[in-house]
């Protein structure tokens, strides 16, 4: 089996690559040449799989490059994980977010339709599409109401995936993934910002941790488990859309308490609220109903939030210890 992953150097791309390699796949990853060469394979290198992946040039905004990749490599499965994925940045770069996160997904679908329509396609949709929630627990039938340019771009890509599935009979599925974290999470995301801050404070490299909205609640799971759900979706005979979540919600404050507690520290002694980190339009609470995924292919999250926070803090402590040597 051959898989092509866009966004292969990100958190999800790295874990998905590892998962597929363990299943005997030939994994091809698409990368932009504008990416910083020294940071390019950081996550893949962390997992020890960088040399096992075939990296190829391509860009979500360049349809010709995507058509060429599909025609030349004829992947059995295509996972579109690439995006401008930082919500806060989407207000500063709404056009770029729309082009990459929204139109970029359609470029991949169009390249497949033209060059290799028999491939199975996975679109990385997002719980941010729910935004100003219409139901306390969100499922595949909950109405969408995005509250950021990122959420709006993801919704466009999601709807177009449904459209290509219904219009052209493509095996195209979307995973509506709720927040999923890990030691490979980007430092700009709040959970990794917290775990990195805890490590720095524990090692005497910092004295406080600036945070924005402490009361925002999210459904946080482990990315390593969520990529398994992506693969399971593409093994189904019929393409469809699935919510992937833990079914539990916790606040930023609660996550911080867990992370500081793991390091033997008290969060309230170090957290400083920073108004500059508040968003123009906040999403107050996201909590997913994963019942459909559990019923269709037996997926359920196993890692607890406490375990996730501890793993991330330990990984950041290890990073600083390694760098100090």
Image (cartoon, rainbow, N blue to C red):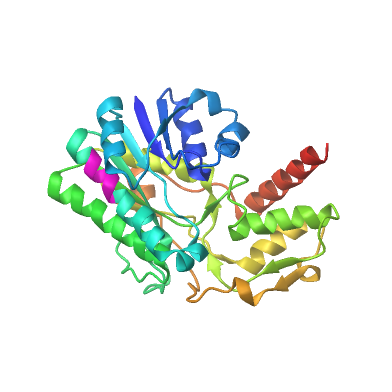
Q: Quadrant of the C terminus?
A: top right
Secondary structure predominantly adopted by residues drawn in magenta: helix
Name the residue at 25% across, 34% down. Answer: 119
Is residue 286 in view from this perspective? no
Name the residue at 35% across, 65% down. Answer: 152
- Residue 16: within the magenta? no
**Which residue is situated farthest in the right direction here?**
204
Residue 206, horizontal then vertical, whole percent: 81, 59
Which residue occupies the foreground of this view, 207 or 140?
A: 207
Is residue 50 in view from this perspective? yes
Image quarter for residue 74?
top left
Q: Which residues are magenta?
A: 106-111
Residue 237, horizontal then vertical, whole percent: 24, 38
**Which residue is situated farthest in the front direction here?**
34
Relative to 225, is 290 on the left or the right? Answer: left
Q: Quadrant of the N terminus?
A: top left
- Residue 107: within the magenta? yes
Residue 67, horizontal then vertical, whole percent: 26, 36
Residue 17, horizontal then vertical, whole percent: 47, 33
Name the residue at 58% across, 51% down. Answer: 186
Name the residue at 50% across, 63% down. Answer: 89
Which residue occupies the foreground of this view, 251 or 147?
A: 147
């Amino acid at each position: 089996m051959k898989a092509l992953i866009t966004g292969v150097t990100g958190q999800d791309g790295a874990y998905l690559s590892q998962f597929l390699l363990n299943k005997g796949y030939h994994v091809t990853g698409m990368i932009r040449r504008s990416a910083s060469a020294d940071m390019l394979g950081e996550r893949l290198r962390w997992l020890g799989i960088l040399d096992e992946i075939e990296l190829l040039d391509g860009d979500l905004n360049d349809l010709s490059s995507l058509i060429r990749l599909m025609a030349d490599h004829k992947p059995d499965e295509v996972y579109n994980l690439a995006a401008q994925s930082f919500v806060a940045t989407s207000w500063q770069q709404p056009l770029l977010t729309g082009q990459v996160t929204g139109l970029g997904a359609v470029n991949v679908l169009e390249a497949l339709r033209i060059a290799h329509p028999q491939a199975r396609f996975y679109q990385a949709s997002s719980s941010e599409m729910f935004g100003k929630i219409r139901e306390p627990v969100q499922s595949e039938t909950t109405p969408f109401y995005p509250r950021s340019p990122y959420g709006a771009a993801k919704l466009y890509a999601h709807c177009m995936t449904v459209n290509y599935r219904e219009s052209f009979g493509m095996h195209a599925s979307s995973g509506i993934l709720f927040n999923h974290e890990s030691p490979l999470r980007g430092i700009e995301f709040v959970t990794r910002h917290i775990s990195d801050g805890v490590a720095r404070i524990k090692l005497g490299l910092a004295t406080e941790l600036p945070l924005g909205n402490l009361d925002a609640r999210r459904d946080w799971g482990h990315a390593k488990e969520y990529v398994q759900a992506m693969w399971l979706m593409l093994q189904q005979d019929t393409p469809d859309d699935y919510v992937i979540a833990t079914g539990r919600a916790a606040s930023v404050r609660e996550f911080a308490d867990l992370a500081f507690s793991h390091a033997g520290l008290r969060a309230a002694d170090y957290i400083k609220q920073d108004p500059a980190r508040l968003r123009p339009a906040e999403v107050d609470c996201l909590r997913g109903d994963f019942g459909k995924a559990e019923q269709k292919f037996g997926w359920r999250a196993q890692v607890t939030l406490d375990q996730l926070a501890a793993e991330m803090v330990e990984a950041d402590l290890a990073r600083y210890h390694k760098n100090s040597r």
